């Protein structure tokens, strides 16, 4: 007679979920500390919107659980490994963009010949 394959039990699934939750909690705490330390060292304003979301300088939302970001000025999203490198990159993009979105709209209109 063939043996029946066993499916993971409820206890195993609960343990797997609990370990994932613990790992994410540890990552969130580590990344939150990195965000706060970076803002303190750079003298940037930071606002904790939720334990999972921080707003830096009024226009950059950081999500410490998965190291994600959302630039409110450009509505671009992504992930980061190094917060200082991300900040430099976004500052450079902003300085190259000039006046901002209105300037971009003007340039697009003028390039269309309107």
Image (spheres, rainbow, N blue to C red):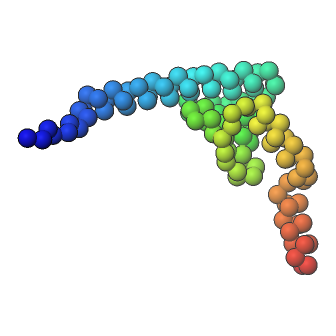
Q: Is residue 49 visible?
A: no
Residue 5: x %, y % from top left? 20, 39
Q: Nearer the viewer, residue 4 or 26?
A: 4
Q: Which residue lies furthest to the left in this view?
A: 1
Instruction: Tell me what residue is drawn at x 84 percent, y 41 percent.
Output: 91
Instruction: Tell me what residue is drawn at x 82 percent, y 57 percent.
Output: 101
Task: Say left or right for 59 vs 65.
Answer: right
Q: Please count the marks in the image.
A: 0
Q: Nearer the viewer, residue 15 or 31?
A: 15
Q: Is residue 104 above or below residue 54?
A: below
Q: Which residue lies furthest to the bottom in this view?
A: 113
Q: Quadrant of the N terminus?
A: top left
Q: Is residue 38 above or below residue 101?
A: above
Q: Nearer the viewer, residue 48 or 96?
A: 96
Residue 86: x %, y % from top left? 76, 37
Q: Can residue 101 be seen in this view?
A: yes
For residue 114, which quarter of the picture? bottom right
Instruction: Tell me what residue is drawn at x 81 percent, y 40 percent.
Output: 89
Residue 11: x %, y % from top left? 26, 28
Instruction: Tell me what residue is drawn at x 90 percent, y 72 percent.
Output: 111
Q: In this view, does 67 lie above or below 97?
A: above
Task: Say left or right for 35 vs 105.
Answer: left
Residue 22: x %, y % from top left? 45, 24
Task: Say left or right for 21 vs 70.
Answer: left
Q: In this view, does 105 lie above or below 8?
A: below
Q: Which residue lies furthest to the front in this view?
A: 1
């Amino acid at each position: 007679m063939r043996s029946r394959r066993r499916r993971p039990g409820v206890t195993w699934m609960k343990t797997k979920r609990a370990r994932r939750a613990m790992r994410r909690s540890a990552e969130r705490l580590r990344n939150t500390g990195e965000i706060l330390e970076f803002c303190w060292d750079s003298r940037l304003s930071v606002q904790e919107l939720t334990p999972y979301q921080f707003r830096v300088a009024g226009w950059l939302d950081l999500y410490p659980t998965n190291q994600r970001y959302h630039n409110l000025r450009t509505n671009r999203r992504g992930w980061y490994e190094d917060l200082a490198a991300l900040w430099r990159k976004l500052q450079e993009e902003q300085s190259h963009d000039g006046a901002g979105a209105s300037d971009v709209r003007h340039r697009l209109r003028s390039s269309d010949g309107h």
